[in-house]
Image: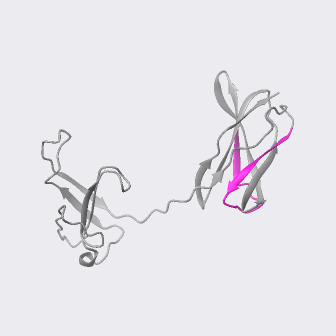
Amino acid sequence: MADDRLWTFTSADTDKSGEYFRFDEYEYGVDNCFIFRPDPAAVGGYQVGDVFEVTLNGGVFLADGATPATVSYTTEFMSKVTVLPLATVTRPQTPLTPRHGRMFTVWGYLKPRHAAGTQAVKLYCSRRVNGTWKLRKTVRATVSDYSTYSKYSVRLSLPSAGRWRIRGYHADADHRASWSTWRYVTAR
């Protein structure tokens, strides 16, 4: 903050609605972090861009656990980041031994429900070549309403015989990226 105020915290500052200080090993965001907050009534509010210079000493030690240390850094408040929910893409269902070059249906489910008629799922088809999986084909699957969620489906063909694996992918403005598990097939 631009007011040059100084706050001093100790382990006695345990009021979660007021002045607060704690070393936390695992409960919040990042392991082994210091959590502190001046009494909100004394601050008057925080703004995006507020900068704080922080110095930690007394009870802070180097890795040897015996040598006292002082840790100083600057931190700047940022806007909240919204973490998008994850949509679930189920494993594609296919015949286990389709004929290469012939069309067959691949389908699965997408939860929650997405707009019917959209191509919300992308299928990645990889073939095993000399011991390595090589991406050989991608196709978009169209979703339709199914119960309280969506069903995706597409007709496709695999261009050559051999071992293949297929999985679905989904991401949009309302959901972060998600993948299904692989479906393994042997094209004859």
User: Can you say whether 88 is above or below 163 in the image?
Assistant: below
Residue 50 drawn at (x, y percent)? 30, 68
In which quadrant is the N terminus drawn?
A: bottom left
With 73 as the anchor, is 155 left or right in this view?
A: right
Of residues 164 and 108, the one drawn nearer to the viewer in this rendering: 108
Which image quadrant: the C terminus?
Answer: top right
The stretch drawn in magenta includes residue 113: yes
Q: Position of residue 55 (x, y in %)?
A: 18, 57
Q: Nearer the viewer, residue 97 or 178?
A: 97
Q: Measuring 36% from the left and 68% from the top, which residue is drawn there? A: 48
**What are the residue bounds of the magenta stretch?**
103-125
User: Depth check: 107 or 116 in front?
Assistant: 107
Left or right placement of residue 27 versus residue 165 in this view: left
Q: How is the image coloured?
A: one colour
Q: Where residue 104 sits: x, y (%)?
A: 84, 40
- Examine the rendered structure and indicate whether residue 17 appears above or below residue 179: below
Residue under the image location 15 percent in, 47 percent down:
69
